[in-house]
Image (spheres, grey):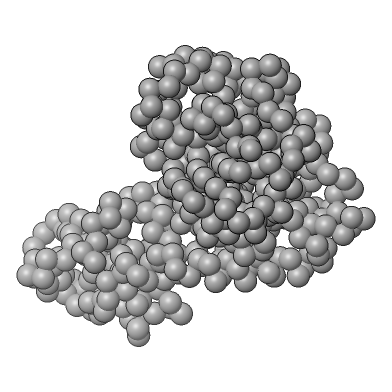
Amino acid sequence: MMQIITTHTHTDFDGLASMMAASIVYPDAVPILPKNINPNVKAFLSIHKDLFETRHVDQIKHDDIESLIIVDVNRWSRLDKMECLKERKGLNIILWDHHMNEGDIKSTWECVEETGAAVTLLIRELKKQRKPITPIQATLFMLGLYEDTGSLLFQSTTSEDAHAAGYLLENKADLTVISKFLRPAYGEKQKNILFRMLQNAKRIEINGYDLSLNVQYIERHINRLAVVVGMYRDILNIDAAFGIFINEKRKKCMVIGRSSLDEFDVGAIMRSMGGGGHPSAGSALLNKVNPDAIKAWILELIKGNQQASVQISDLMSFPVYTLKSDVLMKEVYELLRTRGYSGLPVVENNQMVGIISKRDFKKIKKESQLNAPVKAFMKREVMTIAPGKSPMQAAEIMVKNDIGRLPVIENGNIIGIVTRSDMMMYFYDLHPD
Ligand SMILES: [Mn+2]
């Protein structure tokens, strides 16, 4: 009778780290490594082979398995040759995972929480059980933690991930080794494909997000395309990028998405396409090669998926109190004072022509100017925003132009207004609801 520990195919550092941490928690269990593992993980293992002993699935008899410990994954289809255990009666399944999307593995016992890395959950257990860890184990665990949290930069990072990182440093995790293995190996092939992507880079805007969908034809498999798409996104400085890599000969297409906004969930889009991932990164392997159809599918999913995200129309105040352009400055002054507004839009024939704010009254030098119409003192160049934009985009416009309010314009009509304090309420979650 046998107890095994395993993780997902295309094993990353978090998968391997979680497996090795689990092997300390369950010392009798045998770690089984999938055949397909990521290149940088392979490089690490080739150097540390004697220290992290694993076996391959072909070296065990499935009939002997009595207990299965699964880490960093919650779907049968992502395991290597384990499908036959799916229907096995009386099989004890223990699950340690940080993927909150609905998987199909039914566990006997589980620890599933939304941490940035799965290994964080196992580090908590090792700490609780006061199990000592060696500097090299700490280094591997840190590799997993840093890879899945982007060195604690990804939005998915929790405070417990950061505490776990501190614990690993206390246990002498070696940051030099970590930076060597985490630095994406970026070779000639990757450079060439990035160059090609940049040559036909196009930006599009959907639901207020700046995006790019880039189609490339490839002859054979290229490693680390996710890194390339990440760099492409960074260079274009957009909210999310999708690389569509078509291999016509094999009739396959790899879609890779990277997002820099937590609210733009690439993982959800990739799951709808049969793949998987996290909000910031995901991929899907398709059996179609028609670029227009794939693009249309992604766009449809983006529109569907992102509808729930907060838009300016959810935050704006309306109806908006507006002024006609011939209202006198003294009347405006009274209005601002009595109603407590700090500024008001000015309209002519229902179209916005300017904005007047308390600041503009500094331009008034003598009393007689208070009898001038508001159009003489209003600011004519007004930054506005569309109702479908995101709060982050509104904040960017406000910061860049040093303004505190943005009229919301739809078809030339002013339908609302968002202010700096609306943005603060949103970003700091101060909404009453
Ligand atoms: Mn993970």
Seen from the viewer's position, the closer of residues 129 and 20 is 129
Which residue does the image show at 41% across and 66% down from the upper left? 311
User: How many numbered dots are placed on residues in this image?
Assistant: 0
Which residue does the image show at 87% across and 59% down from the upper left? 251
Q: Residue 32: percent from the left, percent from the top? A: 67, 35
Q: Residue 185: percent from the left, percent from the top? A: 71, 29
Task: Return the residue found at the far right.
Answer: 249
Which residue does the image show at 35% across and 85% down from the upper left? 349
Seen from the viewer's position, the closer of residues 133 and 66 is 66
Figure check: 37 above or below 95? above
Seen from the viewer's position, the closer of residues 298 and 104 is 104
Which of the 4 quarters of the picture holds residue 386? bottom left
Figure check: 222 above or below 265? above
Which residue does the image show at 58% across and 66% down from the upper left? 302
Which of the 4 quarters of the picture holds residue 10? top right
Compared across the picture, whether 322 is left or right of 67 comes to left
Q: Is residue 281 visible?
A: yes
In which quadrant is the N terminus drawn?
top right
Q: Residue 8: percent from the left, percent from the top? A: 65, 44
Seen from the viewer's position, the closer of residues 165 and 32 is 32
Q: Residue 380: percent from the left, percent from the top? A: 35, 65
In which quadrant is the C terminus drawn?
bottom left
Q: Is residue 283 visible?
A: no
Compared across the picture, whether 155 is left or right of 206 comes to left
Compared across the picture, whether 120 is left or right of 46 comes to left
